[in-house]
């Protein structure tokens, strides 16, 4: 598996898009950190971008890589390697190279800003941890969709819809249900509904850790009571981990039966 | 060497292999023929473990190969379409495949044979179809394995490369290897195949030598004999 991983990272690191992605984060980091007097505001803007963009890029890269390397995967399948190792290697390759782009793209501006001398190191690590989780989650989801869909146009469509649903539509439905049922106590419902969407979960996690939950009003206080504690933090990390683990498990299951 | 018993495979409602039985002895060139969609590639892919049969058994050297992967170390496969990662160069790809298999490889000989030296540092995305097929051939023939499976090996090759390919296949045969080959070019079959395995409707319709086939169908030309078999 390590050999496959090595080659897919190698392959991706030479693709132009990895650099475009890296440079995008680099520019974004510099602009936001140095043209903004308030670090909190800069981090929130960064967060809003990371939370929508990393899932989108992870989804697109995942689906594209799967379909583009299909014939090559067939060549690998005829080699004496276990099936699941080929796909795990490719999956980790994409997720790690995207995480590397994110880490370096944001890391360099933060280092220039004085990462090691300020409290910014905490914000930075939180952004990176959440961004990495989102990379791993959405590449896994994209790989699941691609593995289940032969037609690449359809596969691409489903993947984008999945992103759109989790990034935009889910929030819409969530909001509408909050308004419709606002006579009922909704704290538990909102907490649970947040858990079912990795994007929402990441957003809330960052917002609350940044101590700006006061902006969120009453619900914010309920959320703060849960996510703000160490217990809440561990639970949310665990759920993010489940969001990686379950799709990967399904991938393994699907691979046992799939014909190439 | 290969023993297939009662192999069934369905893709949705479409039955591709329908209780196929096949015995292939060690050594020799076997041409797997049949009309389009008769299950040639599916049969080969079952053998490779890429397609998982619904029912049946496949044994190579008396060992079941279903859901195993180690046996592929003694098997070389040439896929139908050669499409490689566009960012890698030819020599990187060759080294990668060498790296994945714990076997000795003699790629230099084959690179010289197909005149690929000027392309070694070129990216695979910039190569023509025929050159890619040559790279594909190098990857297949650089290992010494008992079983060689070629799916449409002649696609895109120029006449000189085709002659080299036929020589390679003959050489493998003299070394006692078993070669399975699918192709639609009947002249190639007529020239090199020892035995023909003819698939129709997911079953073996005919198995025997080229002469036996011509005799059975009362034809002197292989192309016509095959056409007679189909009708």
Image (cartoon, coloured by chain):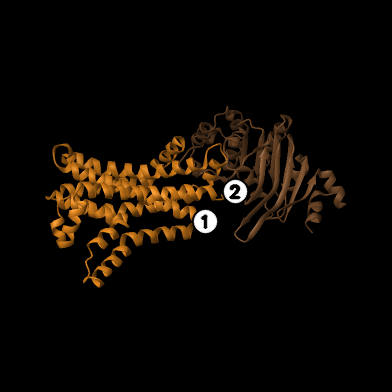
Tell whether A118 sits left or right of B7.
left
SS class, disc 2? loop
B113 displayed left or right of B96: right
Residue A200 quadrant: bottom left
Residue appearing at x 38%, y 59% in the figure: A162
Name the foreground residue: A196 vs B37.
Answer: A196
Q: Say above or below: B202 vs B22.
A: below
Give the image location of residue A88, x and y in percent: 44, 43
Above or below, A5 relative to A171? above
Which numbered disc, 2 or 1, marks the residue closer to the eye? 2
The residue depicted at 69 percent of the width and 43 percent of the height is B181
The correct choice, above or below, for A108 with respect to A212 in the image is above
Q: Chain of mark 2?
A: B
The percent position of residue A133, horizontal first and vertical second, equals 32, 47
Residue, disc 2: B52
Residue picked out by circle 1:
A150
Q: Nearer the viewer, residue B68 or A18?
A: B68
- What letter labels the chain drawn in brown? B
Disc number for residue A125:
none
Q: Is residue A52 visible?
A: no
- Chain seen in orange: A
């Amino acid at each position: 598996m390590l050999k496959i991983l090595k080659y897919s990272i190698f392959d991706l690191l030479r693709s132009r898009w990895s650099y475009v992605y890296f440079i995008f984060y680099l520019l974004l980091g510099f602009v936001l950190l140095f043209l903004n007097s308030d670090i909190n505001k800069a981090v929130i803007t960064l967060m809003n971008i990371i939370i929508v963009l990393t899932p989108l890029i992870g989804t697109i890269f995942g689906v594209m890589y799967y379909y583009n390397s299909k014939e090559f995967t067939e060549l690998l399948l005829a080699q004496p390697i276990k099936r699941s190792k080929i796909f795990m290697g490719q999956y980790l390759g994409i997720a790690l190279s995207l995480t590397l782009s994110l880490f370096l793209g944001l890391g360099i501006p933060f280092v220039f800003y004085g990462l090691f001398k300020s409290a910014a190191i905490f914000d930075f690590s939180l952004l990176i941890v959440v961004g990495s989780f989102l990379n791993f989650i959405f590449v896994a989801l994209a790989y699941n969709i691609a593995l289940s869909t032969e037609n690449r146009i359809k596969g691409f469509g489903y993947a984008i819809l999945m992103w759109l649903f989790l990034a935009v539509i889910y929030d819409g439905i969530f909001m509408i249900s909050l308004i419709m049922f606002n006579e009922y106590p909704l704290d538990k419902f909102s907490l649970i509904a947040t858990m079912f969407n990795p994007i929402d979960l990441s957003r809330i996690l960052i917002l609350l850790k940044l101590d700006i939950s006061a902006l969120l009003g009453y619900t914010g206080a309920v959320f703060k009571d849960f996510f703000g504690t160490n217990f809440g933090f561990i639970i949310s990390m665990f759920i993010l981990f489940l969001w990686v683990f379950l799709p990967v498990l399904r991938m393994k299951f699907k691979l046992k039966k799939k014909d190439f | 060497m290969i023993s297939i018993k009662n192999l069934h495979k369905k893709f949705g409602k479409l039955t591709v292999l329908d209780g196929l039985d096949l015995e292939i002895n060690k050594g020799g060139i076997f041409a797997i023929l049949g009309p389009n969609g008769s299950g040639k590639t599916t049969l080969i892919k079952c053998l490779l473990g890429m397609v998982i049969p619904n029912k049946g058994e496949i044994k190579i050297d008396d060992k079941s190969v279903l859901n195993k992967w180690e046996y592929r170390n003694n098997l070389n496969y040439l896929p139908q379409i050669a499409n490689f990662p566009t960012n890698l160069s030819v020599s990187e790809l060759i080294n990668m495949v060498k790296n994945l298999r714990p076997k000795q490889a003699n790629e230099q000989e084959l690179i010289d044979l197909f005149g690929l030296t000027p392309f070694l540092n070129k990216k695979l995305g910039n190569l023509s179809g025929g050159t890619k097929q040559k790279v594909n051939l190098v990857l297949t023939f650089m290992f010494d394995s008992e079983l060689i499976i070629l799916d449409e090996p002649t696609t895109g090759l120029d006449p000189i490369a085709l002659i080299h390919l036929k020589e390679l296949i003959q050489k493998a045969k003299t070394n006692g290897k078993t070669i399975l080959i699918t192709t639609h070019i009947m002249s190639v079959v007529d020239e090199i195949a020892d035995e023909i395995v003819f698939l129709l409707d997911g079953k073996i319709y005919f198995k025997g030598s080229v002469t036996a086939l011509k005799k059975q169908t009362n034809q002197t030309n292989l192309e016509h004999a095959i056409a007679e078999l189909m009708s």
